[in-house]
Image: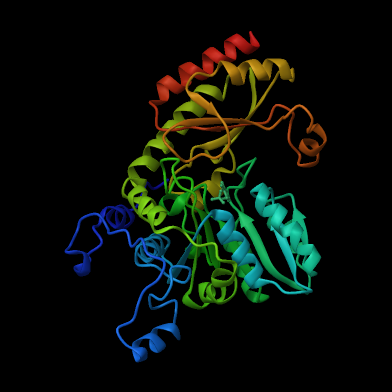
């Protein structure tokens, strides 16, 4: 596995030159709703091309634009549009690519709110098929004549399984189907799906890109035309606009993205090495120990979000384990400095867990930036107290 490419490291660390802000090292925050024009004629010209001129921050903003240029450079995309949240980007992009009568193929277990959004499109006459597999043949057989979108998350939420992106992209292209991937888990440091022929990339910048658990933001990336369709449809009208302040914080997060991702990568490997033969752990879901060939093909490193199941199915012991962890915070979201733990079982949702193919003890771990040895010591003490 190659590690982070020099080109990406340079891009993250490069100062964004800006004559207008007196070459400030840190970019200016254009905290404004509106932009005025110096003349009637200039206003008319700007308002006719709102995405390439500054008219109103719901259309574009200089600070957010700097973030868009940076993300596009990292993913190797022509164009990027930043949103107020990952879901803002996902919902606006999906709704821009479907119409009444469309069909979406959803691959494997995707982010749960994205799944809810796709279900909600039924009332507008958009149907979908969920393929609970990463087998290319199974995915292809779900394609219908009216399939307009194949929606992927790879590695996927819950089981962190990898799709053969190139195979799917080739088939989709031959049938004029748009492929979309949620690349939040890997970040462009570790996976650049446009290189495999995927059409559009989605990100929740609330995770690794922000990197400090202090913002909610999202992005879509692709060709000028591909993202342009989202700008014209879902972006301006649905109004999920990122605050310039949050765009600034995302840019600041990106400065340390390569360093943080290297640390997450080495930490998660050390934690998995320490847990993989532990008899109290039944299974670990993470690309470091599954699908070696596809990991090698698509990933330059490993994100540190994984899931485990326990050999002992007693949920009281699971409760003790979660409550005994000292270095993990209990809660949703991830991608910051702190480690997070998220149990799947909520005392009354066994049926839904079963329907999603999840074991009652399925627990998500996010390995933060703490030294791996301290994380391992903590996990082992909690395992001993709960399960021995
Ligand atoms: C968090 C997350 C989202 C949603 O992003 P928000 O910024 O919370 O709206 C989408 N996909 C994945 C994989 C996520 O982890």
Q: Residue at x 69, y 20 (%)?
A: 311
In the displayed image of the protein, which residue is found farthest to the left? 22
Q: Where's residue 265, x and y in %?
A: 43, 38
In the displayed image of the protein, which residue is found farthest to the right? 351
The quadrant holding residue 95 is: bottom right
Q: Where's residue 8, x and y in %?
A: 33, 55
Q: Where's residue 236, x and y in %?
A: 54, 71
Q: Which residue is drawn at 74% across and 20% down?
A: 313
Above or below for 81 versus 253 = below
Task: Specify whether residue 114 is in view.
Answer: yes
255 or 198, which lies in front?
Answer: 255
The mark tally for this picture is 0
Q: Where's residue 379, x and y in %?
A: 52, 19
Task: Specify whether residue 137 is in view.
Answer: no
Above or below for 55 versus 29 = below
Above or below for 161 versus 218 = above
Q: Residue at x 54, y 23 (%)?
A: 275
Above or below for 189 versus 289 = below
Q: What colour scheme was applied to this rendering of the protein?
A: rainbow
Q: Residue at x 43, y 70 (%)?
A: 60
Q: The N terminus is located in which quarter?
A: top left
Whether residue 328 sits left or right of residue 161 in the image: it is left
In the displayed image of the protein, which residue is found farthest to the bottom? 41
Q: The C terminus is located in which quarter?
A: top right
């Amino acid at each position: 596995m190659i590690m982070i490419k020099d080109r990406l490291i340079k891009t993250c660390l490069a100062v964004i030159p800006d004559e207008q802000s007196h070459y400030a090292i840190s970019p200016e925050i254009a905290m404004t709703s509106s932009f005025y024009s110096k003349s009637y004629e200039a206003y008319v010209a700007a308002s006719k091309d709102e995405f390439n001129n500054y008219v109103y921050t719901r259309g574009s903003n200089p600070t957010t634009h700097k973030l868009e240029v940076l993300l596009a450079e990292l993913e190797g995309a022509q164009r990027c549009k930043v949103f107020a949240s990952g879901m803002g980007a996902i919902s606006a992009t999906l709704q821009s690519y479907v119409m009444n009568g469309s069909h979406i193929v959803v691959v494997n277990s995707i982010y749960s709110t994205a799944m809810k959004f796709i279900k909600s499109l039924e009332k507008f006459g958009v149907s979908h098929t969920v393929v609970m597999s990463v087998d290319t043949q199974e995915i292809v057989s779900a394609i219908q004549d009216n399939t307009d979108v194949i929606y992927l998350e790879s590695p996927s939420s819950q089981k962190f399984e990898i799709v053969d992106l190139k195979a799917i992209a080739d088939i989709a292209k031959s049938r004029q189907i748009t492929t979309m991937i949620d690349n939040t888990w890997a970040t462009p440091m570790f996976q650049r799906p446009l290189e495999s022929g995927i059409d559009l990339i989605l990100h929740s910048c609330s995770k690794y890109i922000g990197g400090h658990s202090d913002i909610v933001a999202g992005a879509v990336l692709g060709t000028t035309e591909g993202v342009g369709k989202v700008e014209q449809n879902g972006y301006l009208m649905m109004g999920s606009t990122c605050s310039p302040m949050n765009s600034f914080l995302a840019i600041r997060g990106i400065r340390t993205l390569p360093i943080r991702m290297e640390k997450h990568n080495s930490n998660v490997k050390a934690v998995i090495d320490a847990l993989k033969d532990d008899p109290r752990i039944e299974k670990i879901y993470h690309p470091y120990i599954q699908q070696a060939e596809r990991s090698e093909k698509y990933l330059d490193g490993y994100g540190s979000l994984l899931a485990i199941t326990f050999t002992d199915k007693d949920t009281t012991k699971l409760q003790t384990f979660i409550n005994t962890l000292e270095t993990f915070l209990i809660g949703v979201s991830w991608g910051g400095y702190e480690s997070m733990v998220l149990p799947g079982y909520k005392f009354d949702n066994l049926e839904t867990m079963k329907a999603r193919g999840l074991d009652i003890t399925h627990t998500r771990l996010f390995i933060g930036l703490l030294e791996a040895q301290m994380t391992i010591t903590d996990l082992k003490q909690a395992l001993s107290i709960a399960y021995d």
